[in-house]
Image (cartoon, helix red, strand yellow):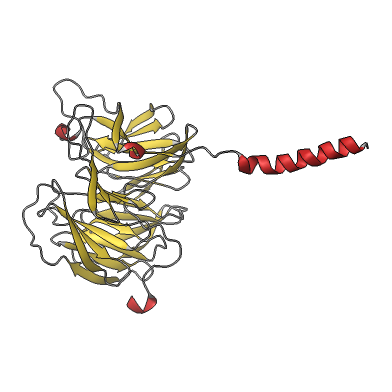
Amino acid sequence: MTLLRRLSIVIFVLVAGTVPSALPRAAEHHFLYVAEPGIRNYVEYGGVGVLVFDMDQGFTFVRRIPSQDVPAGKDPENVKGIAANARTGRLYVTTFRRVIAYDLATDRRLWVKEFDGGCDRLALSPDGRLLYVPSFEGPHWNVLDGETGDIIAKVAPNSGAHNTIYGPDGKRVYLAGLKSPILSIADPSTHTIVGGVGPFSNVVRPFTINGGQTLCFVNVNDLLGFEVGDIKTGKRLHRVEVTGYSKGPVKRHGCPSHGIGLTPDERELWVADGANSAVHIFDARAMPPKQIATVKLRDQPGWITFSLDGRLALPSTGEVIDVATRKVIATLTDDARRPVQSEKVVEVVFADGKVVKTGDQFGIGRVTGESTVPPAAR
């Protein structure tokens, strides 16, 4: 082999080894998908459809994706839930009657299916293959094939099916019903109930879990605050009432606190207060969590979630709150200049035209391991 050829090979190997790392990575772009009508069926808060906002450009309105076909003179169906998955590139929206599946790359509706018993707030497996869809306050959850929408199984805890969280590791699904003080736990490998947490002091309303799936934080009827449960033992641990504020009449849900979420780093727990149009912030590193701050909102909140990076809190009232400063930095407005509100929102991240990350409609903890709470404080 000639000296020139040897040098060429060496240069090629060196360049080939360095070029990939030198190439710029595709920039991520973050969008918020907002399903409407996401406050009951009230069209004044954003109309009908899935509204897309550019999170990297001050939450400016981008476009409206058609959803329901509403006949003239008829009311739209309440949107009940939203979920997205990066692996499959799909978005799902439930109304109280049906599930709508979208291709996130094209905004195209892939299928629309109506189910006996209706639908409520769904959850999606981490791999995007399974949907757990509660019936509309009925006895069962339908387990659907994420690609086709076909029913695979039914899980029936007879709890008044309502809210659903899929565990981050895909091994457990958490099922809350309007008629039970127990948070049921299902095994998605067998589609059977394998445990529960509680009983809590009243029926379980919105709830969240930590990333290690050791703790749950639940709203319950007639409580301005929340309760804490141990997922491993199934026991209720604590009852925490908001101090300095009184319960009062609420517009919706009949529950003083309807909305609860952990920041992704699990340092803070944010809790909705309908009557006082506020969210209360608790230090979740203590057990029980300690109340530390309050943020006033423009209307009564009924839900709260967070951006994937944990910098932003997203209450259902349409404000965008900087978590570090606890200041409102943006408000959502649609293409008709209406203030937008919705309890069904999810973050979707694109790079090179492909979905690379998705958030969750629930403010779930994202810390791996058992818990951020010191063992002595549990």
Q: Is residue 347 above or below residue 257?
A: above
Q: Return the x and y of residue 42 as percentages of the image width and height.
A: 15, 35
Looking at the picture, tell me which residue is in the foreground, 211 or 13: 13
Decide if residue 42 is on the left or right side of residue 177: left
Q: Return the x and y of residue 344 as percentages of the image width and height.
A: 27, 42
User: Residue farthest to the right?
Assistant: 1
Q: Return the x and y of residue 348 as percentages of the image width and height.
A: 39, 40
Q: Return the x and y of residue 272 as percentages of the image width and height.
A: 19, 55
The image quadrant of residue 20 is top right
Name the quarter where the C terminus is drawn: bottom left
Number of marks drawn: 0
User: Residue farthest to the bottom?
Assistant: 376
User: Residue farthest to the left?
Assistant: 249
User: Residue farthest to the top?
Assistant: 72
| Residue depicted at 31% across the width and 65% down the height | 197
Looking at the picture, tell me which residue is in the foreground, 125 or 194: 125
For the question of whether residue 251 can be seen, the reply is yes
Q: Is residue 219 above or below residue 236?
A: above
The image quadrant of residue 90 is top left
| Residue depicted at 87% across the width and 39% down the height | 6
Looking at the picture, tell me which residue is in the foreground, 40 or 52: 52
Q: Is residue 312 above or below residue 352?
A: below
Name the quarter where the N terminus is drawn: top right
For the question of whether residue 203 can be seen, the reply is no
| Residue depicted at 44% across the width and 30% down the height | 105
Decide if residue 59 is on the left or right side of residue 242: right
